[in-house]
Image (cartoon, helix red, strand yellow):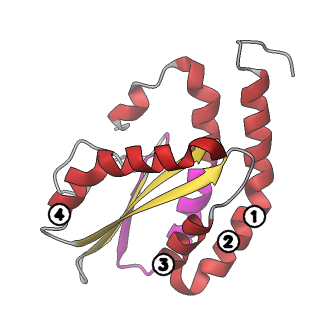
Amino acid sequence: MPCPKRLSCPPAISCLQRRHDKLLALIANFVRSHTPNDVNMVVDLPGEDYIFPISVATSSLCPDLVIWKESSREAWLLELSVVFESVCDDTKMRKELRYNDLLRMANQNYRTKLFHLLIGSRGMVFNKTRRSLAQICKPNCVDLSHLLETRMKDVIESSYYCWIRRNGSSKE
């Protein structure tokens, strides 16, 4: 079942959504392959069944990635934003406000933390994003950081594609 926020996206931002999803899939695949078997994960990507874990909290909100571990009662909510560098602070604040109530609810059952992953539209990986990924992937954070750096070319190309398509033009 797709997340409701995905259903409400106007077609005009579909190329921006594709850019976001490309990067989210990269992060989700890395996390999946570098976490122990007792770690659960849901990701808001096309083709994935997304149901926010009821054991963590009851919510209609859909963070991009939710990772939780039943045994230690820990949960991490990851929200990815690919933004123009000039609006990253505003975006971060808006996302934190959106998930405040969910965090409060989830913290009743789990030790929950929200990680806001900011990637610049020109491929910049912000230092706070690197630190967040280091906390999540502990011994493998260097691998992920290297992986992100090498895939930033995709982000830049996607941003360029969105820019040339901004007025509905199909010119390449």
Q: Is any part of residue 109 visible from this angle?
A: yes
Tag 1: residue type? Glu
> Decide: marks 4, 3 in contact (CB < 8 A)?
no
Residue contact between numbered discs 1 and 2, judged by CB atoms under 8 Å = yes
102 to the left or right of 79: left
Q: Which residues are magenta?
A: 23-46
Going from N to C along the chain, the mark reached first, 2 or 4, is 4
Which residue is rendered at x = 64% and y = 29% of the image?
15
**Spatial separation of the CA atoms under disc 1 and disc 3:** 18 Å
Where does label 4 land, which residue? 55
Tell me if 170 is positioned left or right of 137 in this view: right
Mark 1 vs mark 4: which is more N-terminal?
A: 4
- Secondary-structure class at tag 1: helix
Mark 2 or 4: the one toward you: 2
Q: Residues within 10 Å of mark 2 (few under 14, many from 20)?
A: some
The residues tagged by marks 2 and 4 sit, at their Cα atoms, a distance apart of: 31 Å
Magenta stretch contains residue 31: yes
The residue that label 1 is drawn on is 149
Q: Establish if 31 lies above or below 9.
A: below
Q: Nearer the viewer, mark 4 or mark 3?
A: 3
Q: Which residue is mark 2?
A: 145
Q: Position of residue 3 (x, y in %)?
A: 36, 38
Q: Which residue is mark 3?
A: 135
Query: Mark 1 near mark 3, Cβ–Cβ under 8 Å?
Result: no
Occupied quadrant, residue 130 = bottom right
Asked if residue 139 is positioned above or below residue 134 in the image, the reply reads below
> Which amino acid, by three-letter code, is at mark 2?
Ser
